[in-house]
Image (cartoon, grey):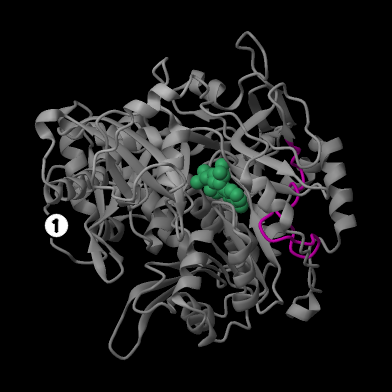
Amino acid sequence: MSESVDPSSKSIESGLQESRLFEPASASSLGMDHWHISSIEQYRELHERSIQDPAGFWGEVASNMHWFEPWTSVLEWTPPDARWFVGGKTNVCDNCVDRQVRDGHGDRVALIWEAEPVDKAGNVEIRKLTYLQLQEQTARFASVLRSLGVTRGDVVTIYMGMVPELAIAMLACARIGAPHSIIFGGFSSQAITDRVQDAKSKVIVTCDGAWRRGKIVPLKDNVDAACEKLATAGDAVEHVVVFKRCENDISWNQSIDRDWATLMAEASDDCPCEAMDSEDMLFLLYTSGSTGKPKGIVHTTGGYMVYTAYTSGLSFNLISDSDQVFWCTADIGWITGHSYIIYGILPLRVPTLMYEGAPNFPEADRFWDIVQRHRVTQFYTAPTAIRAFMKWGSEHPEKHDLSSLKVLGTVGEPINPEAWMWYHRVIGKERCPIVDTWWQTETGGHMITPLPGATPTTPGSCALPMIGIDAAVLDENGNELGANQGGLLAIRKPWPAMLRGIHGDRERFIDTYWSAFGAEDSSVSPFYLAGDSARRDDNGYFWIMGRIDDVINVSGHRLGTMEVESALVSHQAVVEAAVVGMPHEIKGTGIAAFVTLAPASTPSDPSALEELKVSLSSHVANEIGAIAKPDQIRFTDALPKTRSGKIMRRLLRAIASGEGQSNQDTTTLEDFSVLAKLQDDSE
Ligand code: WTA
């Protein structure tokens, strides 16, 4: 841990000032039949039971899913290794799709897709896939994968835009037991190269391009660049399946490129779901950590399937076969999209809406237009988006009929009370409960969240642990802290969707999440350490204070400061770089980079320095992706360091956020040499 938790930090104080409590609305006032959990007493009772008797509780929940063979024991737990529904055989695609068809729901809409482009008359393309159509398409693509030599256990890399074929591709992988590794379409070719290499993936599924704010993102070009590097490195990709979405010009390499449509036309739709072991890997998803390259988080089959469906139902009060339409605005390339666009939602038979593009295309009211058009009932988005909506103005949502909305959700970062109140008033019309869901790529599903019919909410707090979750705030020795004391957020009992490891790196898995509290040796802690700091208020409500490692949360997306630093240092002009988070009006946290240049590459005039900043920025975008572009670059002749050589990040953070003694002119070189001498080794 690079930084200790400071219990006197500002976030605690500001949290304490927030004491508004909003009682849940009645189900009938929202035109709903019932709340699954309708009072705080019912929540507490169920929570208590789930913690006292996890095996009994989760066994019951899991029996709602379809299993080819039952499990012999619900849980085997030897920290840090959990095995859930041991010996059980099931298939996630079967539960999402085939089972619904078998049970007579083949004609129900499973997935609604809306394209980004809007024609002159204001028409948009909408596709609706029933469970039957989804089954047919998924089975066909599963046959395609088989014909390309993919078998159980082979990792398939998916790098696509938000099109239904992305859902089809991932479900097809699940169908035949080939774990997928989905890479967010905003990442660069270097990010693809690293992930394909780490996962030893031989097949990539991509699109020619993706629509984003009226422009085409050249996905296939990025894959081509990655394939070239991979071939040079001796890790050649064997097949690249290309779904043509935008019809943009692409180059075609006969020896590896395959056309989606041609393969699908030839493929059989007879490809039954494989009976997978509950602990077989379902997918890998790369996420940022404090050091080095992104880590491949491993999720397995049974536990993840049970937990995402259970939490989807409870957090959003999803009711099967009703008039509900669920919309999660995340990209499927992030865990939120995996769990709450696809895997948790499809088994519940509530249509899941997938939107292709940007929230402000063609106009700033696009999301509200979509809500109105599809009569969306549950809406799940990120605080960064809410802050952008606030800035764009309330007139945009006010132009639309949002009366279909029943439950609102947020995820990805703490929501500031001001944004919460705006969401509550302008979008929820003071009727809809807001669920602020705290969770992580590693946790697979919601961990701490209000339940919409049961939990009174306070703006800025993610409230109480999910049923089955034993969350706590601990000190550095693993002791639970009292009310309003900041500490380490930990989960004290295993849960079904917990990560099973970091792909190929057992040591990092243990070091990152399971290092024993206060222990001298490297013994494994029985508690999962989330990497966030938090406190509980007098009501026991959780307030997330931020990361305790070198991970920053930019627009709700995790980035390791080290990743951005190594991208900067790989530029020929850069000798050293330090990256810290800084407050940002829309993104929540922005990226500030302090850069030391090689003397020979240091331009003397300010305009050349400005140009260099632009070039460094695009260099980072090439190395990682546009989301990692620094919001601020400052040049310095040396980085401030302690006598033992550690970069004084706290000082840099203060300067970046404007609190420090630094000047406003970011083009001049900062001189840290004096400062550094004045500081002791306290960091
Ligand atoms: C942060 C996203 C406060 C937190 C699902 C966590 C949150 C990291 C919230 C995980 C929330 C997520 N309130 N902070 N409701 N939700 N976070 O892996 O720092 O992309 O550790 O998963 O986001 O980000 P990840």
**Is residue 296 in view?**
no
In the image, residue 528 lies in the stretch drawn in magenta:
no
**Is residue 381 in view?**
yes
| Image quadrant assignment for residue 489 | top right
Q: Position of residue 179 (x, y in %)?
A: 44, 39
In the image, residue 463 lies in the stretch drawn in magenta:
yes
Q: Residue at x 26, y 43 (%)?
A: 620
User: Which three-letter amino acid code belongs to the residue tagged 1?
Assistant: Ile
Q: Residue at x 52, y 66 (%)?
A: 386
Quick check: 152 above or below 460?
above
Q: Nearer the viewer, residue 177 or 354?
A: 354
Residue extending furthest toward the bottom = 121
Q: Position of residue 648 (x, y in %)?
A: 43, 28
Q: Nearer the viewer, residue 313 or 477?
A: 477
Q: Nearer the viewer, residue 26 or 431?
A: 431
Q: Mark 1 = which residue?
A: 250
**Which region shows up in magenta?**
449-472
* Prevalent SS, magenta region: loop
Q: Is residue 234 left or right of residue 526?
A: left
Q: Position of residue 157 (x, y in %)?
A: 35, 42
| Image quadrant assignment for residue 324 | bottom right
